[in-house]
Image: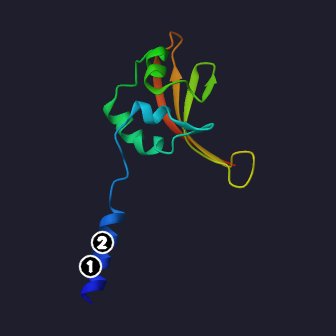
Amino acid sequence: MRHTTALLILVLALASCDNQIKFDKKAWRTKDDIFPCKCRERMIEDLTKNHTLLGLKNSELTGLLGPPDIEQDLNIGYYLEVDYGSDIDPVSTKTLSFSLNSDSTVKHYRIEEWNK
């Protein structure tokens, strides 16, 4: 009975561990071939809570996060996750997206999820 209780406590402790890590500029920019670092999603909480993103110029943002994965008009995005399943086309994505003002400053950011 003691072993079962100890195992249950260990499982609960591991399950409650916070998988979040501190934002690391070098790790964020690391790519495996064309895929972003899998650590990006684990850094997102620290990045959004402890780093000023609103009001940054586009050049400051790309200085911090590197070149965006997506650029369209006044919107840019960084992939947090891309799941291809067993296909050549993505079946789901999770993206940190930024909307810029006409003077290229960040006015809004959000996490967007897309599923096929």
Q: Residue placed at 56% from the left, 30% from the top? A: 77
Residue 110 x %, y %: 49, 35
Write down the residue under mark 2. 10
Q: Quadrant of residue 32?
A: top right
Q: Residue placed at 52% from the left, 19% from the top? A: 100
Q: What amino acid is at disc 1? A: Ala
Q: SS at mark 2?
A: helix
Please give left or right for residue 25 compared with residue 16 in the image: right
In this rendered view, identify the residue nearer to me: 80 or 104.
80
Q: Quadrant of residue 6?
A: bottom left
| 115 is higher (above) or lower (below) than 63 | below
Q: What amino acid is at disc 2? A: Leu
**Name of the residue lying farthest toward the right:** 88
Find out whether the residues at labels 2 and 1 contact each other: C-beta distance under 8 Å. yes
| 21 is higher (above) or lower (below) than 100 | below
Q: Quadrant of residue 34?
A: top right
In this rendered view, identify the residue nearer to me: 35 or 108.
35
Which image quarter is the N terminus in? bottom left
Is residue 114 visible in the rendered image? The answer is no
Write down the residue under mark 1. 6
